[in-house]
Amino acid sequence: MKISFGISHTLIIIFLFIIPEFSAQWSHDFEQGVIPVVIDGDTLPNPWVGGFTAPQWSPIDFDFDSDEDLFAFDRDGSRLLAFERTDEGWVYRPEWVQGWPDLVDWCLLRDYDCDGRPDIFTSHQNGIYVYRNITEDPVNPQFVPVATPLLASYDFGAGPDMLPVICLGIDIPAILDHDGDGDIDIISFTETSSTLYRFHGETACGLEMTCTNRCYGMLAEATENNALFIGDNFNCGFNVVDPRDAMHAGGSITSLQLDNTGPLDLIIGDVSFPLSLAVLMEDAVDGQDSAIFVDQAFPILTGGTEGLYCQRFPASYHIDVDNDGVRDLLFSPNTYLETDDDASVHYLKNTGEDLDPTWDYIQNDFIQESMIDLGRGSYPVLTDLDSDGLIDLVIANKEKYQGVDNTPTSILLFKNTGSPISPVFSHQWQDTVDVSSYGIESAFPALGDLDGDGDLDLIVGDELGLMHRFENIAGEGNWPEFNVSELSISDSEQEVIDIGQFAAPQLIDINSDNLLDLVVGEKNGTLTLFLNCGDNLTQSWCKVVSDAFGENWGDIHVTNILGINGYSTPALYKDSLGIHVLVANETGTVQSFGLVNNDLELALEEVNSEVIANGEGGSGFRAGVAFAELNGDTLVDCIIGIQNGGLRCYISSDTSTSDISTLPLTIGIPIFNVFPNPGKHILNWEFSASPSLLANHSQAAIEVRNELGQSIFKSPVPTPNEGRVSGSISTNNWPGGVYFLSLIELSGTKKGDLLGSPIRWIKLQ
């Protein structure tokens, strides 16, 4: 049997040995952190948003300061995102959406009750749910369901019936006071095909609605292209059941004034096409609005100079982005399929009037430019890449959509240019591992010294279930340079290792033989283990197969969404209790399966289903996680990648575990007196203990580990002199940073066990 764990995680493992209160389950909480990220010399304002895929935008004054902030609902992962408008730009505020209801498919904020607070309109089973906003305190948002579902009066010729307002989950309706009479109206696609419903609000500041038209605008979508049938090409009357045989697969609607005359016009997007349609409307003689002109390359013919191309399914949002009193337009794809995920939010500034707009194309990465967004999927690793004592960041992605059959995969390296207590992840875009040229898609990295030369080599899992080896030729202490050395990795039987799909490897010495083993997650949500049956220079990967569970190590099946896949990504760590088995999954959560058994053929039982939860507001699906102690407080932190292409950062906020230097020793030995602290050239230590006390614990030793968990000094404890034990350690050759001094068992059955709590010492540069 075997387990593998990326060196990045091997280091993480050691961090945890200094936290005595850790058990098989986590005993502390995490809060979203803000670690600076620098790209090409620029510090990102919002690095840890998690990326965008299909965000839907609404204005809202979150903080009651009389200006409009921005709410985004990303239908990919059902994520709720809040951004504060500031003089310096948009600032991510994840805490502002805590306490909001769960949402799916789409969400628009509209003030239906005229109280100045936008209410929630969202999808539910091809209908609409409405939650009234009753928030009084911005730090405590409150919503109450008032229409579940929203109903309207329909008259099919036999008298009115109260039925749900129709809006298919894939669509986005137009919700606003369409006719200026003081109530909310709704325009949505019909359930049958490509015509439009119009639901008229009947009472000011209320939700009473009547279906007044099932062929609004006298228009219909074409089946074969992105055209509309209007005017003489299409005729329909009120309440036509099936006016045209069309195949509607999804549509988005925005209602606004495009030509300063007549009723409000429409912008329509279709799921199958990249261009938006601008539809100019006029009052028909029968009182039913009708379409008179269609701009098929919006906004070229309707107030713009440059066409908008959004890959697929553009959806538009009429919002005053720049706070100049004139509403602009944001466009985002309303699907995660075949879209340029890292440049998917298009901003068109209105340089004209609110009711007579002129559109100036500004950018395609609105707010995205301020965050880490690698396109589709992200998988982090935390490790010291250049042996400088600082934890660096490695990020791989699934793909970056650049067109059909052009979806490259990358591995990016971020150097920690900060300090042991204040990390800063800095990246130059040329620091990218070329994996796409080898046909690798959906890269999952694991790092470890596989050739005994002191630097970290790279194993990459891919979408096909294969793994590939890259040798680091830079040498110990240098920034890595990876060259492919094995395509693809074979097992001890000389057969290419094929996990199935989405191989997610990590490296770790699971059986304490000083050799790195492999544990590999996969699409079906299980783990496969390979022990290193070779040596630290030439690995031989022996698959673990048990009589009870076959190739599924530990009988692990992670949580999934539809009961089919789990997309398991292992994140094992080691502390004084042993190796903890943590696995991230498709739902965006991290599960704990307890400690590795000495008998690797036994089942591992789940002990915590949400070590890290998806959280209120939704945190995204398809998680990959990396753990490390990042800020010098001795508590483990983590970074999680999600399918939206970005990352979330969590800092431990444990209140039950005190700082390590203040914890009482478990065997009654007083805390070390370490001095000077901080220091430069020498570390002095002392404590009081009797010879008989130490004798009860075999032979004791003083050990020093760096913040990566690596043991850099170990020496037997001298015989106490009148109850006092002391010593000095030269630190001239140690790099600046944080170190941990501890008393350990040196021999016997408890060799390596802690005899009390470590103490932190800081080495000055």
Image (cartoon, rainbow, N blue to C red):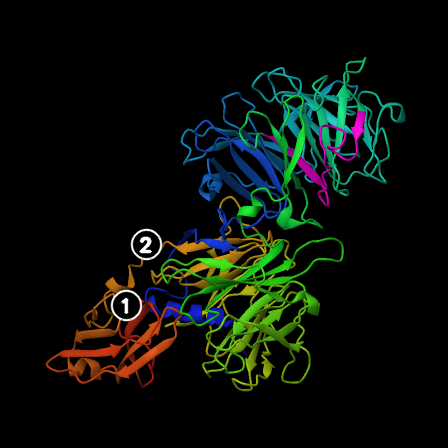
Q: Does the magenta stretch include residue 303?
A: yes
Magenta residues, start to end? 293-319
- Reading the image, the residue beneath label 2 is 655
Across and down, in percent, residue 290 comes to 79, 21
Residue shown at 59% from the left, 53% from the top? 645
Quadrant housing residue 286: top right
Nearer the observer, disc 1 or disc 2?
1
- Reading the image, the residue beneath label 1 is 761
Closer-to-camera residue (278/644): 278
Residue 251 in sight: yes
| Badge 1: residue crowd in 10 Å (few <14, some 14–19, many ≥20) | many
Residue 566 in sight: no
Tag 2's secondary structure? loop
Across and down, in percent, residue 259 comes to 72, 21
Closer-to-camera residue (630/657): 630
Question: Which residue lies most toward the right here?
Answer: 232
Across and down, in percent, residue 150 comes to 62, 28
**Vertical position of residue 276 compared to residue 651: above or below:** above
Check disc 1 and give the amino acid type.
Answer: Trp
**The N terminus - image quarter:** bottom right
In the drawing, does residue 156 fall left or right of residue 573?
right
Q: Report the predominant secondary structure element of the magenta stretch.
A: loop
**Vertical position of residue 380 compared to residue 213: above or below:** below
Q: How far apart are the two marked residues, 1 and 2, measured between alpha carbons?
A: 22 Å
| Badge 2: residue crowd in 10 Å (few <14, some 14–19, many ≥20) | few
Check disc 2 and give the amino acid type.
Answer: Thr
